[in-house]
Amino acid sequence: QVQLVESGGGLVQPGGSLTLSCAASGNILGIYFMGWHRQAPGKQRELVAGITSGGRTNYGDSVKGRFTISRDNAKNTVYLQMNSLKPEDTAVYYCNGDITITTGMRQAYWGQGTQVTVSA
């Protein structure tokens, strides 16, 4: 019914940049919150950044000043601009959305994840 599809992951050198995109599709009535989480091998999933439909943002401490989240409400798409990447940013990045579908049901949906590897 609802799909979140991430794109933009890949291999980048330390200090480089990447932009991730996540597009939500399906029988969507509205999306309040969209965000990015990441999970590195052997570690718990952690919040990277989030943004409300009104544009309010929050960031994990480890990415503040380096990553920027934005969204296009008309396209149901959220972006994550990642600059000054470090090897410790290597992880699978997951998009998620707090979505209300046309039946009125509201729940969290997750994408499949996209791999980001920061290595020389």
Image (tube, helix red, strand yellow):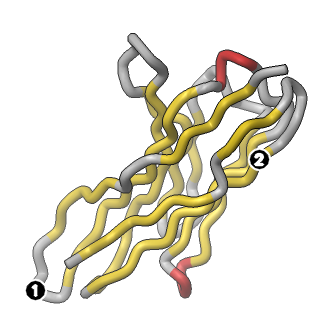
Which residue lies under the disc numbered 2? 18
Position above or below: 106 against 117: below
How far across and down, in percent of the image, does residue 2 sit?
26, 74
Which residue reaches farthest top?
42
Q: In the picture, residue 25 is in which quadrant?
A: bottom left
Position above or below: 108 against 5: above
Q: In the picture, residue 61 is in which quadrant?
A: top right
- Mark 1, other Cα within 10 Å: few <14 / some 14–19 / many ≥20: few
How far across and down, in percent of the image, does residue 18 sit?
77, 47
Which mark sits nearer the N-terminus, 1 or 2?
2
> Is 87 displayed left or right of 44 in the figure?
right
Residue lying at 62% horizontally and 25% vertically, measured from the top left: 90
The tag on residue 103 is 1
Q: Amino acid at mark 2?
A: Leu
Asked whether disc 1 touches disc 2, contact meaning CB atoms under 8 Å apart, the reply is no
Residue lying at 66% horizontally and 16% vertically, measured from the top left: 88
How far across and down, in percent of the image, does residue 89 sit?
65, 25
**Viewer-proximal residue among 21 and 49:** 21
> Is 110 displayed left or right of 118 in the figure?
left
Quadrant containing the N terminus is: bottom left
- Mark 2, other Cα within 10 Å: few <14 / some 14–19 / many ≥20: some
Secondary element under disc 1, as helix, strand or loop, is: loop
Quadrant containing the C terminus is: top right
Residue lying at 48% horizontally and 21% vertically, measured from the top left: 40
> Is 73 displayed left or right of 108 in the figure?
right
Residue lying at 82% horizontally and 38% vertically, measured from the top left: 83
